[in-house]
Amino acid sequence: MKLPVLKAFSASFAYFAMRFRDVLRASWLGVLLLTVAMIVLMPRYLEPMMQMQMVDPNDDPAAALSVMGPALQWLALMYLAMAIVYPMLIVGNLRPLLCGEKLRPPYYLNFGIDELRILGAFLLWLAMTLIIAIVGFTVLTAVSVALTAISPAIGGALSLMGTAAFLTAIIWFSLRMSLIYPATLIEGEIGLPHSWRATKGNSSRLFLYWLLWVGVFVAIGLIYSSIVLPGYYDAIIELFAAGQDQIEQQAATAKINQMQLDMWDISKPRGMLNVALSYIHTLVTVALWNIAAGTAYRYLTEGGARA
């Protein structure tokens, strides 16, 4: 079946508006727990990261490692919190859409077999993507070096074409895997092969579909960051403009880290507002991403709830 791009896009928004109570039941507590985790963990991660910017690893590797250790510890805890909460949010948002379930008020909070499968699907997809990227980049680099040694002009042109082809292949693979979460929930097993089958012949339509959604999320993100992190994108531009200038890089990175640190500091006047807006941003974007994926999967598989 072909994906009706505009119909699925509008249907996702309609579902979000009409079933917003289900969205809230599925998301509000999980997003709250994730927000609390970020309030606790993010400053503890960013503070050593900011200290590390002041250490030259070439002058004192031991000092850099001693600062990096605590940062990685808190980062690992953040990823653990995400690995627990995000599968619950995904399943909570997809169950009413795909399985016709009514979530019991006032909240959804569960980590069972469905959530475990969602986590497994993500880890398997991530591993496959990394392997493809590493192998592809290694082969591309080796071929480019060999061709450039024979003929710089031909090698450069073919290298550019190869890079474009490689990136296209990565995007194509990502599109074919973009429905793994609804496939996992509906099929009751890791959904990579089911997403692959459901998306066959729909790569271009899925590209347009997700391009529309990327536009929505970019617009939401720009509004959100302009309020919560004013000047953030200017600092990002400064970081890229710094090039190989280490001092400029450190200054731009320190500015970015300080903005993020202030964002999660609830002791500051704007801290609570920033946290509240971050909560709303996370709830809305996570719900929309999963509703979009679930809607596309229903259209491509002609609906059908899990038995």
Image (cartoon, rainbow, N blue to C red):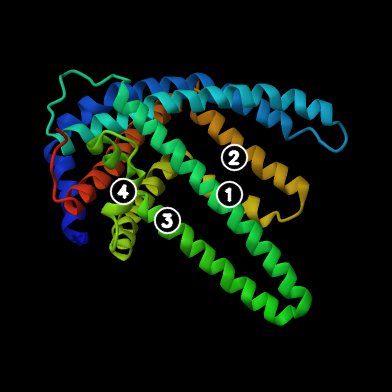
Q: Amino acid at mark 3?
A: Phe
**Helix, strand or loop under label 2:** helix
Marks 1 & 2, CB-CB < 8 Å contact: yes
Residue 269 visible in the current orientation? no
Q: Nearer the viewer, mark 1 or mark 3?
A: 3
Counting from the top left corner in percent of width and height, residue 243 is at: 71, 56
Tell me the residue that label 2 is attached to.
256
- Residue 74 drawn above or below residue 18: above
Q: Residues within 10 Å of mark 3 (few under 14, many from 20)?
A: some
Q: Confirm or deny contact between disc 2 and disc 3 (CB under 8 A).
A: no
**Secondary element at tag 3:** helix
Question: Quick one: label 4, few (<14), some, or many (20+) residues within 10 Å?
Answer: many
Q: Nearer the viewer, residue 137 or 209?
A: 137
Residue 50 is situated, as x and y percent measured from the top left of the image, at: 68, 31
- Name the residue at 46% across, 36% down: 123
Q: Earlier in the sequence, mark 3 or mark 4?
A: 3
Q: Point out the tag, 2 or 3, that comes first from the N-terminus.
A: 3
**Mark drawn on residue 195:** 4
Q: Residue at x 57, y 27 (%)?
A: 75
**What is the spatial separation of the Cα atoms under label 1 and label 2, in whole angstroms?**
7 Å
- Residue that mark 3 sits on: 173
* Visible residue check, residue 20: yes
Amino acid type of the residue tagged 4 in the rendering? Ser
Residue 160 in which image quadrant: bottom right
Q: Report the Cα–Cα distance between label 1 and label 3.
A: 29 Å
Q: Residues within 10 Å of mark 1 (few under 14, many from 20)?
A: some
Q: Nearer the viewer, residue 84 or 249?
A: 84
Disc on the earlier residue, 1 or 3: 3
- The residue pinned by badge 1 equals 236
Q: Residue at x 72, y 74 (%)?
A: 147
Q: Secondary structure at mark 1?
A: helix
